[in-house]
Amino acid sequence: LLVGAASVAAAWCYTGGQRPYGYAGLGEVFVFVFFGLVAVLGTTYVQAGRAGWAALAGAFCVGFLACAILVANNLRDVPTDAAAGKRTLAVRIGERRSRLLFAALVAGGFVAALATAPWHPPALLVLLAAPLAVRPLRTVLGGAAGRDLIPVLKDTGLLELAAGALLGLGLAL
């Protein structure tokens, strides 16, 4: 119940209330915590009764990729967010650094997943998702802006789904 209540409060405070943290450059932190750590570790704990290092690596993988989706979304909105006074992380660090952050988060997702491979070799299954990273990385690093970034949201979401499922399968084997 506490985790559920905290998740609902975090969702509401993202854009609600007097000081929405999503407009203060903290959205990525909360997405990482709630879509990565809380979601993966919480699910693992409920189903397995424990959550060890492999689950933590999985949480980092999923959390980094969830953050990449948000970075792409906020990158798309930099001009309008800046004009509206929304100080998202992308507005704060600028488009160039946001593009590099997107790439670092995608790479970080794979690095986190691969960190488990020495102890769980089937975790290497996550590499089957790597081709799904090519198109969104090319689009973002190629300088796409505005509406041209919309497909990146879908492509990165599919990447997160595939990477999470393949890593989960690998860790279960």
Image: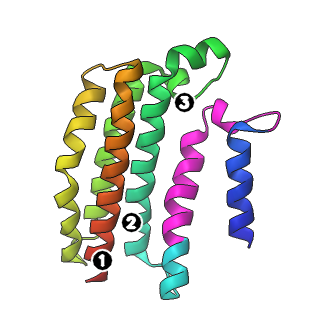
Q: Please name the residue shown 45% across and 35% down the image.
A: 71
Residue topped by disc 3: 89
Which secondary structure type mostly characterizes the magenta part of the structure? helix
Query: Marks 3/1: CA distance?
Result: 33 Å
Residue matched to label 1 = 171
Q: Earlier in the sequence, mark 1 or mark 2?
A: 2
In this image, 70 relative to 14: left or right?
left
- State which region is magenta: 17-41
Tag of residue 58: 2
* Alpha carbons under labels 2 and 3: distance apart: 24 Å
Q: Amino acid at mark 1?
A: Leu
Q: Secondary structure at mark 2?
A: helix
Mark 1 and mark 2 residues within 8 Å of each other at the beta carbon: yes
Describe the element under mark 3 as helix, strand or loop: helix
Q: Residue at x 45, y 54 (%)?
A: 63
Q: Position of residue 134 (x, y in %)?
A: 19, 40
In the rendering, at what x and y percent does residue 35 appear?
Answer: 52, 56
Q: Amino acid at mark 3?
A: Leu
Q: Earlier in the sequence, mark 2 or mark 3?
A: 2
Left-right relation of 118 to 16: left
Q: Is residue 109 positioned above or below 167 on the image?
A: above
| Three-letter code, disc 2 | Gly
Quarter of image, res 18: top right
Residue 88, quarter of picture: top right
Look at the picture and state if 96 lies above or below 161.
above
Q: Position of residue 31 (x, y in %)?
A: 55, 49
Mark 1 packing: few (<14 Cα in 10 Å), some, or many (20+)?
many
**Quadrant, the N terminus:** bottom right
- Give left or right: position of 145 versus 49: left
Tell me if mark 3 has few (under 14), some (14-19) or many (20+) residues whose alpha carbon lies within 10 angstroms of its own.
many
